Image (spheres, grey):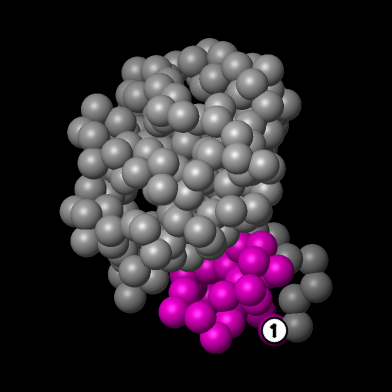
Amino acid sequence: MIGIKPEALHLGDCIGVVATAGSVDLERLQIGVRALRGAGFNVELAEGLTEKKGYLAGGEGPRARALERFFVRPDIRAVFCARGGFGSVQLLPLLDADLIRRHPKVFVGYSDVTILLNWLRQKCGLVTFHGPMVAMEVAAGMTGRTREFFWETLLGEKACWEIKVPHVFRGGAAEGEIAGGCLSLIVTTLGTPY
């Protein structure tokens, strides 16, 4: 299946930040937002982003609606997750795959967000990005190859990657899709509709 590729980002575009899982540390979030702005982007935080419901970033209904709203809005060019933790799986039965499919855009996260990355790929056909989160790696400061690969990929400047494998059993070339994520999260979906 060839995925629906989102348009590349451009400097000055607006990145929407959502919390689909665990509650967000406000100080780290603010540091991450400053880093995104320093990289040349505008940033908008999802409504209710700093809400708390136990260890979660608010109730599942508001988290799902915030995610859908950012996908639908034409002024939001990418959706980045603030952090992982637990709770993204709660959003799946509440999300409208057809609505999201009609509004493809860059979506970035990892860890617990694996559930959403794979759902967006399987149910919506979207190409997604397993990458740094705003209140985590972006706040900590991406450097070197991480920064280069991440931004060049999202800006459409890096068309392919060459990965050197130290122990090759057979020479040659290979081509294919990369899929995966946090294996413990993938295992939790076995035997479910997801």
Q: Vertical placement of 138 versus 156: above or below?
A: above
Asked whether residue 98 appears in the rendered view, the answer is yes
For this rendering, which residue is in front, 162 or 120? 120
Q: Is residue 109 left or right of residue 154?
A: right
Classify the position of the N terminus by image quarter: bottom left
Q: Is residue 181 magenta?
A: yes
Disc 1 secondary structure class: loop
| Most distant residue in the right direction | 167
Name the residue that disc number 1 marks: 170
Q: Residues within 10 Å of mark 1 (few under 14, many from 20)?
A: few
What percent of the width, then of the height, locates residue 22?
Answer: 63, 43
What percent of the width, then of the height, locates residue 156?
Answer: 38, 40
Q: Which residues are magenta?
A: 170-194
Q: Is residue 128 left or right of residue 68?
A: right
Residue beneath the point at 53% across and 61% down: 89
What percent of the width, then of the height, locates residue 164?
Answer: 69, 60
Q: Vertical placement of 97 versus 149: above or below?
A: below
What percent of the width, then of the height, locates residue 187?
Answer: 65, 76
Q: Is residue 13 left or right of residue 24?
A: left
Residue beneath the point at 41% across and 48% down: 61
